[in-house]
Amino acid sequence: LAKTTQPISMDSYEGQEVNITCSHNNIATNDYITWYQQFPSQGPRFIIQGYKTKVTNEVASLFIPADRKSSTLSLPRVSLSDTAVYYCLVDDSNTNAGKSTFGDGTTLTVKP
Amino acid sequence: NAGVTQTPKFRVLKTGQSMTLLCAQDMNHEYMYWYRQDPGMGLRLIHYSVGEGTTAKGEVPDGYNVSRLKKQNFLLGLESAAPSQTSVYFCASSYPALAGGLNEQFFGPGTRLTVL
């Protein structure tokens, strides 16, 4: 299982762009990179998933360099409601079904 | 659609007691998972299932058993609860991702368990 390393915490201010980087040095060929968001007392919620290069959806962008040993979640113009824990997950549901490993996540605090 | 539901939401047990946590999903997902989350920590996979009638061990399976008799239900059992099992338990479900496809886990609201 590919392990991930993220910063424990980050602070930002409303309206800023936030970039959270995840390191996954032993990522396997079939692994995808997925990011989840978790608010207190709730289950995690899917944000974005990618395999390589750049993926963008309505809430975030995911940048993955060619060697895929790291990835960066980018949140544009954060608001107070983006204060949450963000998890980077590397898994391969096709050949290692169910073997998902969540790290300890990054606690993002957005200040006014 | 209710998504993923968990029963009960809260429970307090005494050491040595047993209980079963129920997870149900109405999305026809093949995969189901049980995680535990200790205060200030990430999620750790306890057991998972890739289909009806199948289960497998995750990262921290000791002290837990599971069953998947029906596709929509995944049960987590504690035979003899210990204080170390005090945690929040999350259930999740997902489709198996086809090559290049999206693998998104849908999580339930969690069960907060305290073992005294």
Image (spheres, rainbow, N blue to C red):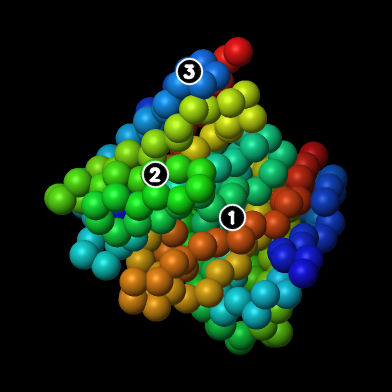
| Residue A11: numbered disc | 3
The residue pinned by badge 2 equals A61
Q: Residues within 10 Å of mark 3 (few under 14, many from 20)?
A: few
Residue type for callout 3: Asp
Chain name for mark 1: B
Of badges 3 and 2, the one in the foreground is: 2
- For the residues bearing labels 3 and 2, Cβ distance under 8 angstroms: no
The answer to whether tags 2 and 1 share a subunit is no
Whichever of labels 3 and 2 marks the residue nearer the N terminus, that label is: 3
Chain name for mark 2: A
Q: Which residue is farthest left?
A: A67
Where does the image place residue A72, in percent across and percent down from the top left?
A: 32, 39
Regarding residue A5, the answer to whether it shows in the image is no
| Residue at (64% x, 57% y) in the render | B107
Q: Residue B36 vs residue B3: left or right?
A: left
Calculate the distance from the C-alpha at mark 3 to the C-alpha at mark 2: 19 Å
| Residue at (60% x, 67% y) in the render | B93
The residue pinned by badge 1 equals B35
The answer to whether tags 3 and 2 share a subunit is yes
**Disc 1 element:** strand
**Disc 3 element:** strand
Q: Residues within 10 Å of mark 2 (few under 14, many from 20)?
A: many
